[in-house]
């Protein structure tokens, strides 16, 4: 019950490989991703939020894990990209995150738009690195200064950097030692 806000970008369970061949641990293993949500929810303060990026192809699995953990979807944020990150039946030109509630948190004083502009990070430090400029508005909207912000899939540490730059405490967790080192250096 100590975490005031979770902002996280877990593997989407799509066996992703970027143009350089980099991949993500457990991106082909639901058992390495979905069980994290129950202890994450237990660690959250009552009446708090979690923001979780997720892709549409595994949304049923994510939704089930969130619900089983006691979290409910209360909103969705879509970032429009000016490029296609992948092509299939459609061109994938967006990222999505779901606003999850534990209990009945107060509504944000200044709610974010449900569609926002994407800032590309360049993915230099991580295959799916989110820009601090994408994460920072989430932190400002759903937490207050001195709150503890946690990212259980920290990757290169964008959430921790955004939290620190906005006067929040942070806790980043990742299983990949190389990403942990990158986040610590940032």
Image (cartoon, rainbow, N blue to C red):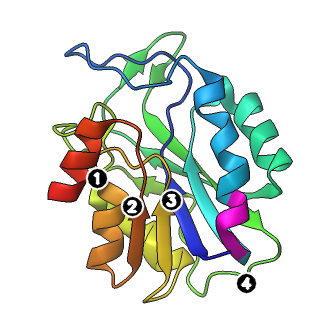
Disc 2 vs disc 3: Cβ atoms closer than 8 Å?
Answer: yes
Question: What span is colored magenta in the figure?
Answer: 41-45
In the image, residue 148 lies at what x, y percent? 49, 77
Query: Closer to the camera, 40 or 49?
Result: 40
In terms of secondary structure, where does tag 3 sit?
A: strand
Instruction: Choose between 62 and 148: the one closer to the eye.
Output: 148
Residue 140 lies in magenta, yes or no? no
Query: Residue 19: x percent and y percent?
Result: 23, 16
Q: Secondary structure at mark 2?
A: helix
Q: CB of mark 1 within 8 Å of CB of mark 2?
A: yes
Q: CA distance from mark 1 to mark 2?
A: 7 Å
Q: Residue at x 47, y 15 (%)?
A: 15
Percent of width and height locating residue 74: 75, 61
Measure the C-alpha gap from mark 2 to mark 3.
8 Å
Instruction: Judge from the rendering whether residue 9 lies leftward or rightward of residue 120; answer left or right.
Output: right
Left of 177 or right of it: where is 4?
Answer: right
Tag 1 and tag 3, C-beta contact below 8 Å: no
Which residue position is annotated with label 4? 106
Q: Which residue is mark 3?
A: 7
Does residue 142 appear in the picture of this structure? yes
Name the residue located 26 percent from the left edge and 77 percent from the top edge: 165
> Going 31% across and 56% down the picture, which residue do you hit?
158
Q: Is residue 145 above or below residue 95?
A: below
Q: Residue at x 35, y 49 (%)?
A: 118
């Amino acid at each position: 019950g100590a975490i005031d806000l979770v902002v996280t970008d877990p593997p989407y369970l799509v066996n992703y490989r970027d143009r350089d061949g980099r991949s993500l641990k457990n991106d082909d293993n639901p058992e390495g991703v979905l069980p994290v949500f129950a202890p994450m929810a237990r660690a959250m303060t009552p009446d708090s939020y979690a923001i979780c990026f997720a892709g549409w192809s595994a949304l049923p699995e994510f939704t089930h894990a969130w619900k089983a953990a006691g979290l409910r979807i209360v909103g969705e944020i879509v970032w429009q990209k000016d490029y296609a990150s992948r092509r299939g039946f459609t061109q994938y030109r967006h990222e999505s995150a779901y606003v999850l509630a534990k209990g009945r948190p107060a509504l944000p004083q200044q709610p974010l738009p449900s569609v926002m502009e994407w800032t590309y990070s360049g993915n230099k430090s991580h295959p799916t690195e989110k820009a601090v400029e994408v994460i920072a508005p989430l932190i400002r909207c759903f937490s207050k200064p001195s709150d503890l912000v946690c990212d259980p899939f920290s990757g290169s540490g964008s959430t921790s950097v955004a939290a620190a730059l906005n006067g929040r405490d942070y806790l980043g967790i990742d299983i990949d030692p190389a990403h942990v080192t990158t986040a610590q250096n940032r």
